[in-house]
Amino acid sequence: MNDSEVDVIELDCKYVAATEQGDGFQILFEKEPPDPDSDDEYNCEHVVPYFLIQRHLEPPGDGEFYVETENPETCGHCSIGVSSLSRNCFQVDVRWTKKLASRFRIRFRAGQETFEEVRRVLSTMLGKGKLQLIWSGA
């Protein structure tokens, strides 16, 4: 997929978190850090831009990917194409149907420990050959 074939959705995030629980994996990118005083886990009541990707490797998910954003049109189960991760950017091709696809380009800030956890969880979640790691000299 190239940029002319898909909708390119760009997001600048100040917050990223990686979670692994049993056979489930999740990465959450948010434009603003979560409000610790709010009951709203993903800030969706306030329509703060975010990108959530999840995968469960055992039943009932059986390896299906789920993506959620603040936009209902870019939420749901999907297939994931080739993606890349650098120190400050995650790019992923998401196919919702055979004819509809989106490319998410998410720039983020994270300390070294958080980045290493994001890299580890994404590598496990996406599987071999799906995540290209881009290293910079910085």
Image: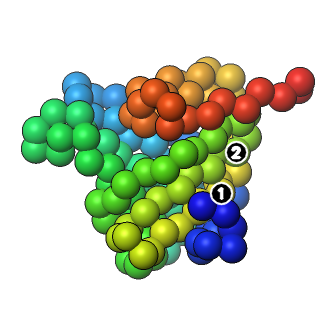
Q: Residue at x 38, y 77 (%)?
A: 72
Using the image as rendered, state which of residue 79 and residue 110 is in the foreground: 79
Q: Is residue 69 visible?
A: yes
Residue holding disc 1? 105
Which residue type does callout 2 highlight? Cys
- The x, y position of residue 69, in whole percent, is 45, 65
Quarter of the rendering containing residue 113? top right
Q: How is the image coloured?
A: rainbow
Residue 4 image offset from top left, x and y in percent:
69, 73
Q: Look at the numbered disc 1 and give the secondary structure of its residue.
A: strand
Q: Which residue is mark 2?
A: 89
Image spot of residue 66 (x, y percent): 32, 54
Q: Residue at x 17, y 45 (%)?
A: 61
Quadrant position of the N terminus in the picture: bottom right
Tell which of 26 and 34 is nearer to you. Answer: 26
Q: Which mark is residue 121?
A: none
- Name the kind of residue labelled 1 in the image: Arg
Residue 89 horizontal side relative to residue 53, left or right: right
In this rendering, the answer to whether 93 lies above or below 61 is below
- Please report whichever mark, 2 or 1, sits nearer to the chain's N-terminal start: 2
Quarter that holds the C terminus: top right
Disc 2 to disc 1: CB gap under 8 Å: yes
User: In what element is the residue under mark 2?
Assistant: strand
In which quarter of the view is residue 16 placed? top right
In the displayed orientation, state which residue is furthest to the right.
Answer: 137
Outermost residue on the left side: it is 60
